[in-house]
Image (cartoon, helix red, strand yellow):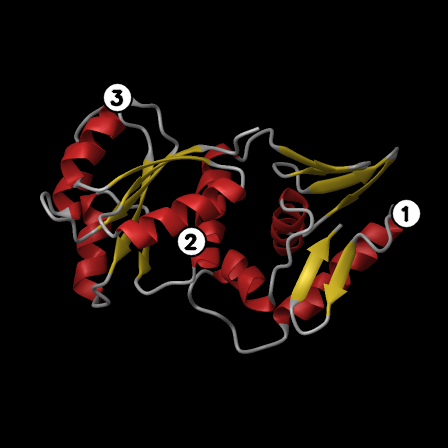
Amino acid sequence: MSRGRLLLIEDDAVLRGLVQQELGQAGFEVDAVATGADGISAALDGAYDLLILDLNLPDVDGLEVARRLQDDDEVEAEILMLTARGDVASRVDGLYAGASDYLTKPFDVRELVARVHVRLRERNVEGEEVRHGDVVLDVAAGTVRHGSQQVMLSESEREILSLLLSHPGRVFSRDDLERRLYGPELPASNTVEVLVHKLRRRLAEIGVVELIRTVRRRGYVVL
């Protein structure tokens, strides 16, 4: 099942194809267009959960696209803006135009996928459950249960478990998990290792062991 419907507005054909493929593999339904005019038309015609909008488009500037869409009451999708402009003023302009998040080019596509998950989770967190076998994570309540047993997780533990359970078989590096927790400002510490250790102890309390595996020199995975 689709985890959300996305519209990608990006004029670079190579990047557009790569992002569309990666997001599709992550479980999202992705439509992609190359111009601002086509993006506006598609956004007005379709019910999207999130728009991924390039700032530098060949016809209509991304800021103008964002403003037009934000002025239309029928467009409820949030906007994640992609920009090659790294200055603060450009990012602020994007936020004022209606973007709820931004990512500066060049970027790791894995970070974009994680940002999309964060934006949609915050949008749809109420009532969401993530299941993996007999393990059920109630995202809104912050609890994980196994059979008749249940334990409360901290917000950070919940974030990590939600990402891992949503992508069984996919290895997430420490940086991936840190971006999930902190965005682009990564802490200079072993925060993730400590959180994963605590999370494993929480899971063990309800009889769940070896759910989160360590892949040497790569990161963590749920199998």
Residue at image x 60%, y 32%? Answer: 128
Q: Residues within 10 Å of mark 1 (few under 14, many from 20)?
A: few
For badge 3, the amino acid type reads Asp
Q: Nearer the viewer, residue 24 or 136?
A: 24
Q: Residues within 10 Å of mark 3 (few under 14, many from 20)?
A: few
Mark closest to the chain's N terminus, 1 or 2: 2
Please report contact status of discs 1 and 3: CB closer than 8 Å, yes or no. no
Between marks 1 and 3 in the image, the one whose residue lies nearer the viewer: 3
Label drawn at residue 207: 1
Q: Which residue is mark 3?
A: 45
Mark closest to the chain's N terminus, 3 or 2: 3
Looking at the image, residue 190 lies above or below residue 77: below
Left or right: 125 in relation to 42: right
For badge 1, the amino acid type reads Gly
Please report contact status of discs 3 and 2: CB closer than 8 Å, yes or no. no
Left or right: 84 in relation to 58: right
Q: Horizontal and vertical percent for residue 199?
A: 75, 57
Label drawn at residue 169: none
Q: CA distance from mark 1 to mark 2?
A: 34 Å
Residue at image x 36%, y 29%? Answer: 48
- Disc 1 on helix, strand or loop? loop
Q: Residues within 10 Å of mark 2 (few under 14, many from 20)?
A: many
Q: Which residue is mark 2?
A: 112
- Quick check: can you spot residue 101? no
In terms of image quadrants, where is residue 73?
top left
Looking at the image, residue 216 lies above or below residue 108: below
- Disc 2 on helix, strand or loop? helix
- Quick check: can you spot residue 143? yes
For badge 2, the amino acid type reads Leu
**Numbered marks: total:** 3
